[in-house]
């Protein structure tokens, strides 16, 4: 990276100025790596991994994404390309809280841990093992590519029979297939389908085919979630149900914040809702696909999705509107014309609910757990932690080492491995899970692994109940 010691006068870039250069139309693209700001406008199209780099511009720190998506050897290549085609602008202003730091941390038991050494050691060991035994991080990519093509074919067939052949059974199958496409697009947008960026873009577009937007999803998931999992006011997943539901202990208790008489009715309603949120949330997962379909438009218009700012691009807005219109024609207008409103409504509810239940039940158990909240990290300054340690503390697996569970969950049963190596083929996660577990224990870190999906789901269920009960003491999490 740039050697700041050679600069006679140091330039500092404010976070506000940085955010203005996020690749929006007629805007340049700036990125922050290790606290240093670079103009990469001319480099984005040269990036070997494709245009995924565009999402990392304009955010306070892209170091997590830079390190987790690249092996040690590819990092050196990217650094060389960055030095050649990028332009160093200065340091990110030191007032920025999100700036990544690398220091020594002392734990309550006296253990001293180098923040950077854990991930360097783990990454080197994983890369050496995979290169020697499997040829790299994208081994088995033909399996995932074949699955993607077959799943798309099945989507077309079930859509045809549902929309043109009056088949309720096709609607049921379509729900399962849409969830499978959700898992595939998740890997595609993480560059985990193939070493070829065009394959990843193709499969990532599955998100648009099933009615949502890969563009808004990538910002919400890869930027807001992956860089700061379970961090309140940063990770959008913490506030999905707010203000009705309480998914995070730092979401204020209704009784404490609504003492004004004019707000008492609203407060009582929310207290009542939160008391039963552990029951209501699993039920309301059924509207997940409907929510995605609608929210994308709002995010694109506002250029903001929850806690993350989106780059405004007219061609993205237009293409998203076109794909949503096509989805509406295929799944609503066509069956309505042929078979009427009742059939259209029933089949729409069937496949949207089944798809949402399958997909969202898998996603929800990996982070909404009592022992995965950032306040549980026992260090004086949590921001001094290397990003990889933060990921380990705030993430849980279930049924590690199981290839069957890996297939069923789209690799999300290995959530720890996924957060540390998001661009890796999911069928390599069972292979490296033992290495990750050993290194976690070696560095005194937890490795949360539930014995089954059921145990993980039940822990999530009871934790939601705790969060919703105003009489439960959650001081240890705040």
Image: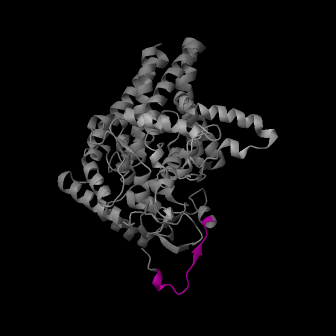
Farthest right residue in view: 262
Which quarter of the figure is the N terminus placed in? bottom left
Residue pictured at 57% horizontal, 65% vertical: 97
Depth check, front residue: 313 or 122: 122
Residues drawn in magenta: 4-15
The image shows residue 77, relative to residue 441, as above or below, that is below
Residue 292: x, y in percent?
A: 55, 36
* In this rendering, position of residue 20 left or right of residue 89: right
Q: From this viewpoint, is residue 48 visible?
A: no
The image shows residue 406, relative to residue 389, as above or below, that is above
Asked whether residue 26 is drawn in magenta, I would say: no
Residue pictured at 50% horizontal, 43% vertical: 214
* In this rendering, position of residue 23 left or right of residue 143: right
Depth check, front residue: 416 or 3: 416
Q: Quadrant of residue 84?
A: bottom left
Depth check, front residue: 71 or 416: 416
* In this rendering, position of residue 71 left or right of residue 342: left
Asked whether residue 13 is drawn in magenta, I would say: yes
Depth check, front residue: 51 or 232: 232
Residue 335: x, y in percent?
A: 54, 17
Q: Quadrant of residue 403?
A: top left
Residue 319: x, y in percent?
A: 55, 41
Residue pictured at 46% horizontal, 60% vertical: 44
């Amino acid at each position: 990276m740039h050697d700041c010691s050679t600069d006679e006068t140091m330039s500092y870039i404010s976070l506000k100025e940085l955010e203005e250069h996020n690749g929006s139309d007629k805007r340049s693209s700036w990125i922050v790596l290790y606290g240093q700001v670079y103009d990469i406008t001319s480099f984005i199209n040269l990036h070997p991994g494709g245009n995924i780099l565009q999402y990392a511009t304009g955010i306070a720190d892209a170091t997590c994404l830079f390190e987790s998506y690249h092996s040690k050897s590819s990092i050196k290549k990217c650094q060389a390309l960055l030095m050649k085609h990028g332009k160093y602008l200065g340091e990110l202003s030191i007032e920025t809280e999100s700036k990544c730091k690398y220091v020594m941390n002392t734990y309550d038991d006296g253990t001293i841990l180098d923040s950077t050494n854990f991930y360097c050691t783990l990454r080197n060991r994983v890369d050496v093992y995979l290169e020697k035994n499997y040829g790299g991080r994208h081994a088995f990519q033909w399996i995932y590519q074949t699955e993607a093509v077959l799943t798309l074919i099945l989507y077309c067939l079930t859509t045809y029979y549902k929309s043109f052949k009056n088949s309720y059974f096709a609607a049921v199958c379509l729900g399962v297939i849409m969830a499978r496409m959700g898992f595939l697009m998740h890997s595609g947008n993480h560059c985990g389908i193939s070493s070829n960026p065009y394959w990843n873009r193709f499969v990532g577009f599955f998100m648009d085919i099933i009615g949502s937007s890969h563009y808004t999803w990538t910002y919400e998931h890869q930027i807001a979630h992956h860089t700061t999992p379970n961090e309140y006011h940063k990770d959008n997943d913490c506030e999905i149900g707010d203000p009705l539901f309480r998914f995070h202990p730092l979401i204020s208790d209704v009784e404490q914040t609504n003492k004004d008489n004019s707000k008492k009715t609203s407060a009582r309603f929310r207290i009542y809702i939160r008391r039963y949120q552990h029951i209501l949330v699993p039920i309301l997962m059924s509207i997940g696909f409907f929510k995605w379909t609608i929210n994308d438009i709002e995010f694109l218009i506002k250029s903001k999705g929850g806690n993350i700012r989106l780059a405004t691009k007219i061609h993205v807005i237009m293409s998203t509107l076109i794909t949503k219109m096509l989805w509406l024609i295929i799944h609503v207008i066509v069956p309505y014309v042929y078979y009427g409103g009742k059939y259209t409504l029933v089949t729409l509810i069937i496949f949207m609910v089944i798809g949402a239940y399958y997909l969202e039940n898998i996603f929800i158990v990996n982070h909404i757990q009592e022992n995965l909240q950032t306040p549980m990290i026992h260090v004086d300054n949590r921001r001094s932690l290397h990003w990889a340690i933060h990921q380990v503390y705030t993430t849980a697996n279930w049924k590690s080492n199981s290839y069957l569970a890996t297939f069923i969950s789209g690799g999300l049963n290995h959530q720890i491995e996924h957060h540390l190596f998001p661009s890796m083929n999911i069928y390599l996660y069972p292979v490296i899970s033992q290495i990750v577990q050993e290194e976690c224990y070696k560095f005194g870190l937890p490795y949360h692994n539930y014995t089954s999906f059921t145990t993980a789901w039940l822990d999530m269920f009871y934790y939601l109940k705790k969060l919703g009960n105003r009489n439960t003491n959650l001081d240890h999490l705040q």
